[in-house]
Amino acid sequence: MDATQWSEESKRSYLYCGHSYSQSDRYCDIHYSCIRCASPAVFTAADQKRSFEVKKNYIWQRRDLCPACHAQWVQLKAKDRACQARWTAERLTLKHDASFMGDWLQVLEALPSYDRRKHSSMKTHLRKLLEQPSQGTKLLAPAPTQTDAHHPPSPVSR
């Protein structure tokens, strides 16, 4: 264990402060059960060393997922980030794309079994959009332009 290689955040932690580490200090394997599939797994001493000293992860970080579930979670998170990026760039067209919204909704519905986060606001939004008829109905109000933002519409009806 080489605590001098920990991240700066870890060095500010209770574990680091007030404890002088020597070469005899070492990481120990940590046995745990996967929160998703309940299979037994081990956060090995070598994995801890790589995680804390090379990757600079926070020292109190622990494993919740077995390696197989972790790999699936990484893929789902990548899909979610890709969908978020596309949504940000192409919202006006994608809000009419049931295939895209359905695929993204499946990703968001799968994530809580891996990371305990609900992602509920986006799931609710996608469900509402998917339930809307696609008969040319305006599904969402367009985002205000800069001109609109500086000059709100007049309350007088025309």
Image: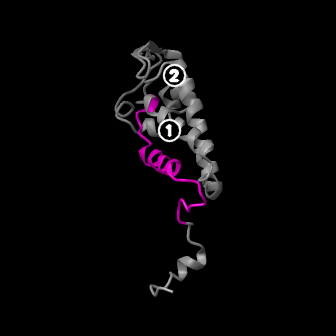
Report if residue 7 lies within the magenta region.
no
Mark 1 or 2 closer to N-term? 2
Mark identifier at residue 12: none
Crowd tier of the residue under label 2, counting other residues whose Cα lies within 10 Å: few below 14, some 14–19, many 20 or above: some
How many numbered marks, from 0 up?
2
Q: Tell which of 143 and 80 is nearer to you.
A: 143
Residue 130, image x and y in percent? 53, 47
Residue 110, image x and y in percent? 49, 32
Mark identifier at residue 69: 2
Secondary structure type for disc 1? helix
Q: In this view, does 126 lie above or below 147?
A: above
Mark identifier at residue 108: 1
Q: Residue at x 36, y 28 (%)?
A: 19
| Residue 60 horizontal side relative to residue 5, left or right | left
Please name the amino acid that badge 1 sits on.
Leu
Please name the amino acid that badge 2 sits on.
Cys
Give the Cα distance between marks 1 and 2. 16 Å
Residue 158, image x and y in percent? 51, 86
Specify how the rendered protein is coloured.
one colour
Crowd tier of the residue under label 1, counting other residues whose Cα lies within 10 Å: few below 14, some 14–19, many 20 or above: many
Stretch of the chain drawn in magenta: 114-141
Q: Is residue 100 above or below residue 21?
A: below
Residue 46, image x and y in percent? 53, 16
Q: Tell which of 35 and 147 is nearer to you.
A: 147
Q: Which residue is drawn at 47% across and 28% down?
A: 3
Q: Tell which of 131 and 66 is nearer to you.
A: 131
Place residue 117 in its image quadrant. top left
Report if residue 118 lies within the magenta region.
yes
Secondary structure type for disc 2? helix
Mark nearer the viewer, 1 or 2: 1
